[in-house]
Amino acid sequence: MTGDRRVRGIGIAILAVGTSMLVACSAQPAVDLHSANAASGASRQTETRGSVDVSVLRVGFADFYAEKSPEALARKRPIVAAGIVDGWQQGPILESYPNGPLDYRIVLRVKITEPLKGVQGRKSIANNIVYIELDQGAVMRDDNLAPKDWKPIHPVSDFERAIPTGTPVLVFPRERPPHEEKVQNLGDALPANAELMTVHPQGLLFEDPALMKRRDEDISALVGAFEDIRQGGEAWGEAKSMRDMMDRLKRNGISGG
């Protein structure tokens, strides 16, 4: 692909096989919990940490072709919008494989405050809120229960603590195609006509309030949800704040809502 480069995802989904902390993920192979956490931490050690905790979102492997700049990604996505986290809710619960654990999804609600592309008049966006479906991660194994009754390690409340309501966010979503897996439970209801959205691995950025206070250190306050924002190249690290990023997109013709 012209202008793209392939990046190997760094997230780890876990199925531990010890006797105490036991977890399972329907889509990934078994690995040791401690080793997985160590590997995941090592791969992110160059990132500057703030108050936004994206570790709850970095749960799955994802090789992808990285766009070399934010505007390159924006040109390929139907929707681009800035806003704030409006909250989190339970997403669809899917059947993974016969007699296996269920595949849980979490939904991030984004209240749009600045539409940049594809928002105005879009029927799938209700009340100016985008509903983004994300992987909820592994489930806790309990041998006293059937696998289908194992629950997620991270409930909805963990996501709210990690990335609280009001956190500035930039999204590059598109409407989600129908699930390939059987849907056992639709999760919390959406408003009429609203549709679930998905995002590219580079297409969900948060502005970290703690890092914003360190602007004098020339530290970017923008945090990639799934990968270090710089994985795509130098252009991604040039914007130091959400306002910087939106100004950059507008200068490159991504504006008008």
Image: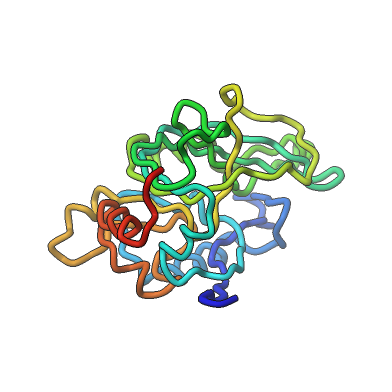
- In the displayed structure, 236 sits above or below 25; it is below
Quadrant into which the N terminus falls? bottom right
**Nearer to me, 145 or 25:** 25
**Nearer to me, 2 or 137:** 2
Q: Quadrant of residue 192?
A: top right
**Residue at 39%, 54% in the rendered image:** 254
Quadrant into which the C terminus falls? top left
**Residue at 64%, 29% in the rendered image:** 187
Q: Tell whether 18 sits left or right of 110.
A: right
Q: Quadrant of residue 239?
A: bottom left
Q: Tell whether 116 sits left or right of 79.
A: left
Question: How many numbered circles does the render carry?
Answer: 0
Report the residue that reaches farthest toward the left: 216
Residue 78 x %, y %:
53, 50
- In the displayed structure, 53 sits above or below 178; it is below
**Residue at 57%, 55% in the rendered image:** 59
**Residue at 52%, 62% in the rendered image:** 37
Q: Tell whether 156 sits left or right of 19.
A: left
Report the residue that reaches farthest toward the right: 98
